[in-house]
């Protein structure tokens, strides 16, 4: 479904991704792990259209996303839950969710999706009129996920949703990701929380210095002795 | 006491006009991150346009709105389209639009000279008419400007709070890239918003032509009103601009009655400085932004 081929990207002269390729199939959860600065966020931003690719192609169900104008990517079926959540802090929770349903197709199903999101995150429904900036970190993360769901994506990109959250909340968030996946949404998850991230996934990639260095079924990666030594601190 | 009462009335009424004059700068700065001084020229040129139609073509001053607003809206939207094309930054926008302001001021000077231009009273019955309540007078141009400002403020408030367009505007102001990631076409929103702001500036210009004499240097004189209102009201805040307009209007009016007209700018700047020191996000907003 998602096919990233030979993508390079970076900032000014500093290249962050070097000819990177990966795929996500329909209904799959794919987790990308890697150390800080490996290029995980850059990858998410390039797929989500927030940053241009220098070379290569990104294809979603036969639709070329590469260097599509940022505001057109969402309607093609990709939604981003960015690093640091980036909710609209001075808008209410429900206005934040409405922004997720901004593009035409999503707007048509707004009420229906809103009800679904409220069912998954009853907390958001309770705080619908509160400003997003006044929510706790965990609630903001839920809002960022809910906002992305409002656009009814085929592919959900999540950039370190566990960052800075208490373990119980991380667990709850990961449960939700699993639940969203069960309804047919494909997931591309970026995590530094390697073990939990891979346990959730069907397949995984290891990203180092802008290159994919390992890939395979998540269970295999979790069992790999070498990876265990360098990443899991076992 | 009547003197002060009348000053407060004049100040409040002027506040509506000040808000309309400031809305363009406030929205453009707060939402689009462009400090667009061209709005001062739009107000001035709309004023001259209205003057010209009323004086030479016998139009009722109120009716001139119908001709002046569309022209200024188109110019405002095109200018924004140009800014989008060259991806102008906040600081460059200040320089570029200052240049534009100076240029348009000299255009105005070459067409209408540096002299005062006022619609003759034969063509402008409103200048001398007013609503009288007890000892107090509500001059027609100022009163209608104030009521118009209230209507525009409420419409803008509704637009920004309730519609998808308004939510997109606020989202752009708070996190431009995230708004775009969810489908907001920045250029489209920016052009529409600029058109609306230009319309408001043009309406302000028409009311100014109706109530006072025009001269090219006015555009720069308005800095002393508009920037205090924009800062006090909070960047991008419509009702904030209305509230701030009234505060500035009343302060200036009271200062001129108490110490003389030359103290009016001093009063507004004292308020501006105090705001910057103690509430830089503005008097009427919870935080800086819409
Ligand atoms: N805005 C930026 N400007 C310049 N360099 C950046 C920027 N963001 C990230 N980088 C660099 O790009 C590389 C990849 O960063 P990033 O994608 O954020 O990694 P990760 O998300 O895996 O921590 C790093 O070397 C980082 O320093
Ligand atoms: Mg990152």
Image (spheres, coloured by chain):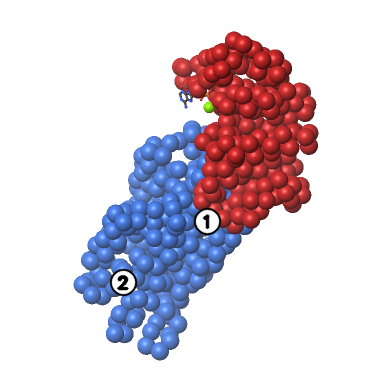
Hue of chain B? Answer: blue
Distance of label 1 from label 2 (alpha carbons): 27 Å
Q: Which mark is residue B253?
A: 2
Q: Which residue is mark 1?
A: B199
Q: Quadrant of the C terminus of chain A?
A: top right
Q: Is residue A114 left or right of residue A39?
A: right
Q: Secondary structure at mark 2?
A: helix
Q: Residue at x 74, y 47 (%)?
A: A116
Q: Quadrant of residue B215?
A: bottom left
- On the question of residue B157 being in view, the answer is yes
Disc 2 residue crowd, few under 14, some 14–19, many 20+, Cα 10 Å: many
Report x, y in % for residue A160. Answer: 57, 31
Q: Is residue B281 left or right of residue A82?
A: left
Report x, y in % for residue B135. Answer: 37, 88
Q: Secondary structure at mark 1?
A: helix
Q: Residue at x 59, y 10 (%)?
A: A226
> Mark 2 or mark 1, which is nearer the start of the sequence?
1
Q: Is residue B186 left or right of residue B248?
A: right
Hue of chain A? Answer: red
* Callout 1–callout 2 Cβ contact below 8 Å: no
Q: Nearer the viewer, residue B105 or A11?
A: A11
Camera-near label (1 vs 2) is 2
Report x, y in % for residue B83. Answer: 49, 38
Q: Compared with residue A16, is residue B25 higher up or lower down, i.e. above or below?
A: below
């Amino acid at each position: 479904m998602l096919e990233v081929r030979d993508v390079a990207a970076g900032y000014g002269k500093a290249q962050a991704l070097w000819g990177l390729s990966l795929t996500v199939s329909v209904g799959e959860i794919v987790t990308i792990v890697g150390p800080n600065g490996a290029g995980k966020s850059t990858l998410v931003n390039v797929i989500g259209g927030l940053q241009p690719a220098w070379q290569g192609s990104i294809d979603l169900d036969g639709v070329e996303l590469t260097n599509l104008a940022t505001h057109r990517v969402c309607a093609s079926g990709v939604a981003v839950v960015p690093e640091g959540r980036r909710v609209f802090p001075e808008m209410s929770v429900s206005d934040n969710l409405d922004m997720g349903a901004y593009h035409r197709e999503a707007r048509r199903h707004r009420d229906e999706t809103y009800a679904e999101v409220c069912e998954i995150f009853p907390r958001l429904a309770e705080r619908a009129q509160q400003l997003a900036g006044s929510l706790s970190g965990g609630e903001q993360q839920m809002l960022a996920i809910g906002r992305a769901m409002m656009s009814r994506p085929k592919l959900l990109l999540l950039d370190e949703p566990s960052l800075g959250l208490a373990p119980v909340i991380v667990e709850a968030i990961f449960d939700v990701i699993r639940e969203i996946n069960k309804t047919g949404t494909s997931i591309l998850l970026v995590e530094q929380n390697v073990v939990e991230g891979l346990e959730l996934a069907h397949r995984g990639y290891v990203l180092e210095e802008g290159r994919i260095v390992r890939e395979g079924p998540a269970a295999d990666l979790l069992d790999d002795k070498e990876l265990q030594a360098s990443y899991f601190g076992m | 006491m009547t003197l002060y009462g009348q000053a407060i009335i004049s100040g409040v009424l002027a506040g509506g006009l000040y808000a309309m004059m400031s809305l363009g700068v406030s929205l453009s700065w707060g939402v689009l991150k462009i400090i667009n001084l061209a709005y001062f020229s739009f107000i001035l040129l709309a004023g001259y346009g209205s003057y010209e139609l009323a004086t030479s073509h016998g139009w009722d001053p109120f009716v001139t709105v119908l001709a002046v607003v569309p022209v200024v809206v188109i110019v405002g939207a095109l200018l924004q389209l140009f800014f989008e094309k060259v991806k102008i930054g906040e600081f460059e926008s200040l320089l570029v639009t200052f240049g534009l302001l100076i240029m348009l001021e000299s255009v105005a000077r070459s067409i209408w000279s540096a002299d005062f231009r006022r619609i003759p009273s034969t063509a402008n019955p409103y200048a001398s008419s007013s609503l009288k309540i007890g000892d107090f007078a509500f001059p027609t141009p100022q009163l209608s400007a104030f009521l118009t400002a209230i209507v525009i403020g409420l419409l803008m408030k509704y637009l920004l709070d309730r519609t998808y367009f308004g939510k997109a505007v606020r989202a752009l102001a708070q996190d431009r890239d995230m708004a775009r990631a969810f489908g907001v076409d920045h250029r489209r929103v920016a052009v529409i918003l600029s058109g609306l702001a230009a319309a408001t500036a043009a309406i302000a210009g028409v009311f100014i032509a109706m109530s006072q004499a025009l001269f090219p240097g006015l555009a720069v004189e308005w800095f002393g009103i508009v920037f205090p209102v924009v800062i006090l009201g909070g960047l991008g805040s419509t009702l904030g601009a209305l509230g701030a307009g009234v505060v500035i209007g009343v302060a200036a009016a009271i200062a001129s009655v108490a110490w003389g007209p030359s103290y009016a700018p001093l009063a507004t700047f004292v308020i501006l400085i105090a705001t910057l020191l103690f509430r830089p996000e503005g008097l009427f907003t919870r935080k800086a932004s819409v």
